[in-house]
Image: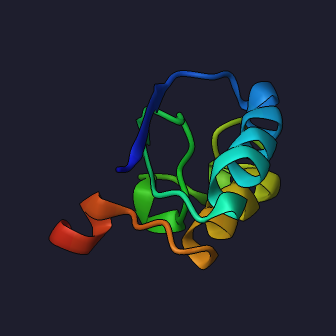
């Protein structure tokens, strides 16, 4: 049985939520379906003007790392999988 989470968090709360997912569910081998609007552009292709947004919340390096972390640990960006 997969655990589902549909969330809307400001970027300041993402690290706390990430720790809960990692230690309480994912590290126990449980399946997780994580959905929501993270208000974060993962790659330059996600923005019309990426260079102008390098220091803007939603396109910060630490936010890219947050998404990279999930992708490296087996999560799938289903939109990218189907449409890119």
x, y percentage for residue 51? 64, 59
Residue at 63 percent across and 58 percent down: it is 26
Along the line of sight, which residue is nearer the eye, 60 or 38?
38
Along the line of sight, which residue is nearer the eye, 42 or 73?
73
x, y percentage for residue 74? 52, 74
Seen in the picture, residue 60 relative to 12 is either above or below; the reply is below
Seen in the picture, residue 76 relative to 23 is either above or below; the reply is below
x, y percentage for residue 14? 73, 35
In this rendering, position of residue 13 left or right of residue 25: right
Seen in the picture, residue 79 relative to 72 is either above or below; the reply is above
In this rendering, position of residue 74 left or right of residue 4: right
Q: Quadrant of residue 17?
A: top right
In this rendering, position of residue 81 left or right of residue 15: left
Q: Quadrant of residue 11?
A: top right
Which image quarter holds the C terminus?
bottom left
Along the line of sight, which residue is nearer the eye, 40 or 68?
68
């Amino acid at each position: 049985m997969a655990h589902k989470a549909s969330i809307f968090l400001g970027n300041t709360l993402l690290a706390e939520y990430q720790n809960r997912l990692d230690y309480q569910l994912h590290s126990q081998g449980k399946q997780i379906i994580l959905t929501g609007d993270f208000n974060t552009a993962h790659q330059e292709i996600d923005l019309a003007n990426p260079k102008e947004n390098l220091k803007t919340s939603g396109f910060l390096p630490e936010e890219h790392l947050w998404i990279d972390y999930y992708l490296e640990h087996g999560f799938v960006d289903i939109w990218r999988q189907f449409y890119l």
